[in-house]
Image (cartoon, rainbow, N blue to C red):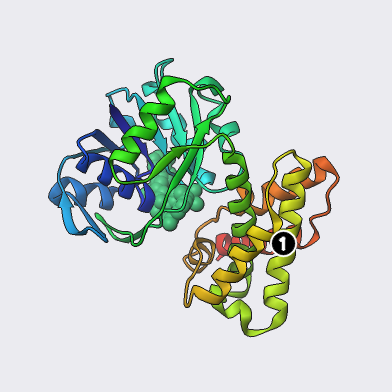
């Protein structure tokens, strides 16, 4: 299968590297010149539980240089860049292209639907972690998994082919018709921990410095799960709350991506996480007071970063 990864940062490089190692034809498409240049020169350096190696069998290019239409386009930009990134590779898309998003947040199907119909979109969630160490170097650790389904719920052959390719690459993938439950529960988890850490600059475990830290996180989870359930998704409050408590107890020193983005003065994914929950809550008549306050605080921090 010809696979293109759109947005070859931490996750895109991890997935692209493992798929290439498993024998797939993979092109990494990105706009980060230093990262692309390093991979072109010496291959992708991937450090994970399987070792530290350079993966040479990867093609890399900028969007406008990409010429080979892929069978599968995996979108791994941050959610705020999805539409602009897809515009950059529109010339590669045809009725034969399947597009997969395992990005965090909500609204990914809607964004991709501007470019291909739902019958060509697959949506899912992954628990694999990845970090950019530097240009051309990505790190991951531990075990993750992928759950995905077709955006229109159909059981088309492309779904099985995608699951097979990702599983063969060691990425532990399964088709899951209940994937929206996992997507919403991850959104609830991220809305709580990402936005509170971004605003307070606490690491995840520091939310336990005061009982109010944990209580606020659990209130955001409660709001998000209430919105999920009002929208017809059977997300589970006890399960998601337990994951948040475990993270606060166990993730010593962990800085969620939204905190990393704030510290680096970059825009965050808050619009597709807290913002999407608040918007859906308004539509469905579910109160999201704490989630909305955190949204506005993160937006304010972002606005301040722009004016300097
Ligand atoms: P990242 O910032 O490391 O990578 C995003 C890449 O997109 C960057 O290399 C950037 O240059 C590229 N990009 C931006 N605009 C582009 C454009 N117009 N055309 C092509 N490329 C463009 O982000 P990440 O950590 O890999 O996360 C990607 C997505 O996966 C996010 O939605 C994130 O929430 C989700 N996710 C991340 C992790 C993780 O551990 N990192 C885990 C699960 C899900």
Residue 210 image-quadrant placement: bottom right
The total of numbered circles placed on residues is 1
The vertical placement of 14 against 291, above or below, is: above
Q: Which residue is mark 1?
A: 220
Identified at 37% across, 45% down, the residue is 172
Residue 199 position, x and y percent, is: 63, 70
Label 1 element class: helix
Residue 301 appearing in the image: no
Disc 1 packing (10 Å; few <14; some 14–19; many ≥20) = many
Q: Is residue 298 left or right of residue 61?
A: right
Residue 172 appearing in the image: yes
Residue 174 image-quadrant placement: top left
Task: Say if disc 1 is inside 8 Å of ligand 1.
Answer: no
Residue 19 image-quadrant placement: top left
Residue 209 position, x and y percent, is: 63, 84
Q: Is residue 30 left or right of residue 246?
A: left
């Amino acid at each position: 299968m010809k696979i293109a990864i759109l947005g070859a940062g931490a996750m895109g490089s991890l997935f692209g590297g493992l798929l290439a190692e498993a024998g797939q034809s993979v092109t990494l498409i990105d706009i980060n010149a230093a990262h692309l240049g390093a991979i072109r020169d010496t291959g992708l350096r991937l450090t994970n539980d399987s070792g530290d190696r350079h993966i040479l069998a990867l093609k890399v290019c900028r969007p406008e240089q990409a010429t080979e239409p892929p069978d599968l386009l995996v979108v791994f930009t941050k959610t705020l860049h999805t539409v602009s990134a897809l515009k950059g590779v529109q010339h590669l898309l045809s009725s034969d292209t399947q597009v997969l998003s395992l990005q965090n947040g909500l609204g990914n199907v809607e964004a991709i639907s501007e470019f291909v119909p739902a019958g060509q979109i697959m949506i899912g969630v992954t628990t694999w972690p990845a970090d950019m160490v530097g240009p051309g170097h990505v790190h991951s650790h531990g075990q993750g998994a992928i759950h995905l389904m077709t955006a229109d719920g159909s059981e088309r052959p492309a779904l099985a082919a995608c699951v097979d390719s990702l599983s063969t690459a060691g990425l532990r993938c399964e088709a899951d018709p209940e994937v929206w439950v996992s997507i919403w529960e991850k959104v609830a988890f991220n809305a709580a921990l990402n936005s509170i850490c971004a605003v307070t600059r606490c690491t995840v475990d520091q939310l336990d410095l005061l009982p109010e830290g944990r209580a606020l996180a659990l209130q955001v989870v409660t709001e998000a799960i209430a919105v999920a359930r009002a929208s017809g998704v059977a997300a589970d409050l006890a399960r998601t709350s337990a994951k948040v408590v475990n993270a606060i107890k166990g993730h010593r020193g962990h800085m969620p991506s939204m905190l990393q983005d704030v510290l680096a003065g970059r825009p965050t994914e808050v619009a597709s996480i807290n913002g999407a929950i608040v918007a859906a809550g308004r539509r469905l008549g579910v109160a999201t007071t704490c989630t909305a306050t955190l949204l506005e605080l993160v937006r304010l921090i972002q606005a301040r970063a722009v004016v300097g």
